[in-house]
Image (cartoon, grey):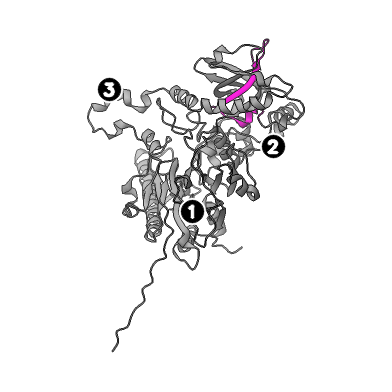
């Protein structure tokens, strides 16, 4: 009698891409050396206090940022001077001034410094910027105390720059500062690509400005402004030689898993976030459902656990294992401890769900990199440390596949045999983009002044910038978090600024966005038409910008093909339309 042979189904062969993490440079600033000291009084000694991160002044990080980006800004400004030398204006004769204090009045000059926006705090409404809801809305557009107006418009108006109401724009370096203002350049000023728009910059942005200081007012009227942009690296992806294949290596980027609770959208529609995660898991692990063999890596851009507000019901109650605990600001200490214990229990449950989901993905052979977010149990100041291994025990058992990175994230994917075919990936959980959006507006300064000077100026809607435009601006700035430490909480640093783009990324993403958006930009930071992308890539490198939506809200994940930089979105829906 022949023994029956059982066929064992082997897992699908994965597209393997060598990966080199480079986010350790962020970890050097997120994990100070004294954090590894043992207890006792050693941390209180004068020697230890000198190395404490908060023993430094925040002014040092602005000086380090200016030193790192100065040469790039000057180079971009001189490129414009070469073009303007043949025009009728005398802009081409402008000379670079080393320090602001040395600038001469009435002479075309090039100044490099940090932009500072001084805005009258008296006209700003009191806002609650808690960032406690399931998305970035409460942080980006916080509610206004004692106002029934739309929170988004009230928040944008509170940060809107308006020179008619006393707001002033400065350019600053270590020697001093000078007031700057846009120069009127005929009727086509709005079409001038390098014109200064106060509502397109934020405090902390390093820029080179070309203009001349007025003899009467001492104000520098700016003809053009030039940002640093990322450096032009030798690493370049030759997409013309990398043709599409059936199993082209694909990078999957997801954000906002929201483990532990359903999103408000699910509550209203009757959907289930857990069911959508199961659909995603089957898509990754089952080759018959999706092209799972092509996924070479998955990056989770923050938002792995649900926010604290999602654990609370509308009446301030917290569900804890069938029991209900009511939180009240006037409760005694015993009830407050009970509320905190219930929240800690729900957080632990959310982390368990996240750990189980990661372990199932990892068991299929797909490497996973987890970027911590705002609600994760780690430090709040940027750069955020990697989440501790004890919080994700099952996932961390996959030593070779699971990566706990910092926020921001950076790594290199080797997509070819040639060293010049490396793909550098850079991104974050999106908090830096959400914070920058508060200070940017799509309307030009001339339109804003015209609207505010009218009879119904205060009722004119202000068009806020999109997540993609804000991400694109940080790419032009050459800096991931220009609003830190003025608005975005960061660690002080005296040696260097970790958020300066030291190398040009091939993929640059931001998580926890409202919707999926993508854009292709060239070496100058200008948008490239997708149809002409192949021709542009043959001459110079391009970068794929990606805004990753929250999976808990949209059920969408983003796929980026590494050989061609083509980008698409896959949606998972468990509710019948």
Residue shown at 50% from the left, 34% from the top:
481
Which residue, given by chain and number where applicable, does mark 3 sit on?
A: 47
Residue shown at 44% from the left, 51% from the top:
417
Which residue, given by chain and number where applicable, does mark 1 sit on?
A: 252
Q: Position of residue 9 (x, y in %)?
A: 38, 71
Q: Residues within 10 Å of mark 2 (few under 14, many from 20)?
A: some
Residue span colored magenta: 194-220
Circle 3 sits in a helix, a strand or a loop, which is it? helix
Viewer-side residue, 236 vs 198? 236
Magenta span includes 405: no
Separation of marks 2 and 1 at Cα, in angstroms = 37 Å
Q: Position of residue 577 (x, y in %)?
A: 61, 63
Instruction: Say which label, 2 or 1, has the lower sequence index.
Output: 1
State yes or no: discs 2 and 3 in contact (Cβ < 8 Å). no
Q: Residue 112's quadrant in the figure?
A: top right
For this orientation, the residue located farthest to the top is: 216
Which residue, given by chain and number where applicable, does mark 2 sit on?
A: 461
For this orientation, the residue located farthest to the bottom is: 1
The relative height of residue 242 versus residue 48 in the rendered view (above or below) is below
Q: Residue 73's quadrant in the figure?
A: top right
Circle 1 sits in a helix, a strand or a loop, which is it? strand
93 relative to 479 in the view: left or right: right
Q: Position of residue 381 (x, y in %)?
A: 42, 34
Q: Position of residue 337 (x, y in %)?
A: 35, 42
For this orientation, the residue located farthest to the left is: 40
Magenta span includes 195: yes
The relative height of residue 525 versus residue 450 in the rendered view (above or below) is below
The relative height of residue 185 versus residue 414 in the rendered view (above or below) is above
């Amino acid at each position: 009698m022949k023994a029956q042979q059982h066929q064992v189904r082997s897992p699908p062969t994965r597209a393997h891409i060598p990966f080199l993490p480079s986010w350790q440079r962020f970890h050097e600033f997120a994990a100070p050396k004294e954090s590894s000291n043992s207890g006792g009084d050693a941390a209180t000694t004068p020697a230890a206090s000198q190395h404490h991160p908060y023993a430094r002044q925040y002014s040092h990080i602005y000086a380090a940022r200016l030193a790192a980006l100065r040469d790039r800004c000057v180079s971009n400004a001189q490129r414009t001077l070469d073009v303007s030398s043949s025009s009728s204006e005398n802009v081409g004769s402008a000379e670079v001034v080393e320090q602001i204090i040395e600038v001469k009045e009435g002479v075309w000059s090039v100044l490099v410094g940090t932009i500072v926006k001084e805005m009258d705090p008296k006209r700003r409404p009191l806002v609650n910027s808690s960032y406690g809801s399931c998305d970035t809305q409460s942080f980006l557009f916080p509610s206004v105390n004692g106002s029934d107006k739309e929170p988004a418009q009230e928040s944008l108006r509170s940060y809107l720059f308006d020179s008619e109401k006393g707001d002033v724009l400065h350019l600053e370096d270590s020697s001093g500062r000078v007031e700057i203002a846009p120069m009127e350049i005929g009727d086509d000023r709005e079409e001038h690509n390098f014109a200064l728009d106060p509502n397109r910059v934020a405090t902390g942005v390093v820029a080179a400005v070309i203009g001349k200081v007025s003899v009467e007012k001492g104000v520098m009227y700016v003809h053009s402004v030039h940002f640093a942009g990322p450096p032009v690296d030798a690493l370049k992806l030759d997409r013309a030689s990398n043709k599409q294949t059936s199993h082209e290596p694909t990078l999957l980027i997801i954000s906002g898993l929201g483990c532990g609770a359903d999103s408000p959208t699910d509550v209203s529609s009757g959907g289930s976030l857990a069911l959508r995660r199961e659909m995603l898991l089957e898509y990754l692990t089952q080759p018959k459902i999706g092209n799972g063999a092509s996924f070479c890596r998955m990056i989770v851009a923050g938002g792995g656990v649900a926010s604290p507000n999602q654990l609370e019901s509308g009446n301030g109650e917290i569900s804890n294992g069938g029991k209900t605990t009511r939180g009240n600001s006037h409760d005694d200490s015993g009830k407050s401890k009970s509320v905190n214990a219930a929240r800690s229990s729900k957080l632990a449950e959310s982390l368990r769900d996240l750990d189980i989901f990661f372990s199932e993905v990892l068991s299929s052979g797909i490497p996973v990199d987890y970027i911590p977010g705002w609600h994760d149990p780690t430090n709040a100041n940027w750069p955020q440390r990697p989440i501790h291994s004890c919080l994700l025990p099952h996932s961390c058992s996959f030593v070779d596949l699971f990566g706990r990175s910092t926020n921001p994230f950076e790594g290199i994917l080797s997509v070819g045999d040639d060293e010049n075919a490396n793909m550098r990936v850079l991104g974050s959980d999106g908090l830096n983009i959400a914070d920058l959006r508060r200070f940017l507006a799509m309307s030009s300064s001339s339109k804003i002044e015209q609207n505010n000077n009218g009879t119904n100026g205060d009722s004119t809607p202000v068009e806020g910038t999109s997540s993609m435009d804000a991400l694109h601006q940080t790419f032009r700035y050459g800096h991931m978090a220009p609003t830190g430490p003025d608005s975005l909480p960061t660690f002080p640093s005296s040696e260097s600024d970790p958020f300066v783009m030291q190398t040009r990324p091939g993929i640059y993403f931001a998580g926890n966005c409202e919707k999926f958006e993508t854009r292709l930009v060239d070496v100058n930071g200008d948008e490239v038409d997708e149809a002409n992308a192949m021709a542009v890539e043959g001459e110079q490198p391009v970068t794929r910008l990606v805004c990753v939506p929250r999976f808990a809200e949209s059920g969408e994940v983003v796929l980026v093909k590494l050989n061609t930089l083509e980008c698409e979105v896959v949606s998972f829906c468990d509710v019948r339309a």
